[in-house]
């Protein structure tokens, strides 16, 4: 149980990983924009703005960290879209890491 949990929570790193971040996407018919900027709260890698439908990612992050931050913020966007306003950061991290793992390990 411990091992699984650790794997779930541990971000996956790949040096060769290019940024896998879209410019926009839709959830339930609503378009979200993804902006790479350094206008992000000082202690955060990214930010999910529900009212503006915008995810902001710290521009200066290494690609792999930025991609992980994107999936984290995407989970916040999914929760907001499904009517969940209370977000447990550990759960968001785990869900985001798993989505990221899925994305970088998928094969056709
Ligand atoms: Zn968060």
Image (cartoon, helix red, strand yellow):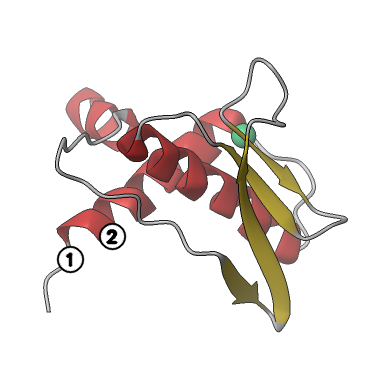
The quadrant where residue 52 appears: bottom right
- Taking 28 as reference, is 104 above or below it? above
**Residue 64 placement, left or right of 7:** right
Is the residue marked by circle 1 packed among few (<14), some (14-19), or many (20+) residues within 10 Å? few
Residue 13 or 84: which is nearer the viewer?
A: 13
Q: Residue, x 64% and y 15% (percent of image)?
A: 43
- Taking 80 as reference, is 69 above or below it? above
Residue 36 percent coordinates (x, y): 58, 45
Q: Which mark is residue 17?
A: none
Contact check, label 2 and label 1, Cβ < 8 Å: yes
Ligand 1 image-quadrant field: top right
The quadrant where residue 80 appears: bottom right
Cα distance between the residues tagged 2 and 1: 6 Å
Residue 74 percent coordinates (x, y): 56, 54
Q: Residue, x 52% and y 29% (percent of image)?
A: 90
Per the image, the residue denoted by label 2 is: 103
Residue 11 percent coordinates (x, y): 30, 32
Q: Residue, x 59% and y 68% (percent of image)?
A: 24
**Residue 50 placement, left or right of 71:** right
**Element type at marker 2?**
helix
For the C terminus, give its image quadrant.
bottom left
Per the image, the residue denoted by label 1 is: 106
The quadrant where residue 44 appears: top right
Residue found farthest to the bottom: 29
**Element type at marker 1?**
loop
């Amino acid at each position: 149980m411990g091992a699984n949990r650790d794997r779930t929570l541990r971000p996956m790193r790949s040096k060769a990983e290019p940024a896998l971040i879209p410019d926009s996407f839709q959830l339930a018919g609503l378009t979200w924009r993804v902006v790479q900027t350094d206008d992000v709260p000082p202690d955060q890698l990214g930010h999910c703005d529900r009212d503006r439908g915008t995810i902001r990612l710290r521009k200066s992050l290494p690609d792999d960290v930025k991609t992980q931050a994107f999936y984290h913020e995407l989970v916040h966007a999914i929760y907001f879209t499904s009517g969940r306003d209370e977000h447990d950061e550990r759960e968001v991290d785990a869900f985001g890491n798993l989505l990221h793992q899925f994305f970088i390990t998928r094969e056709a």
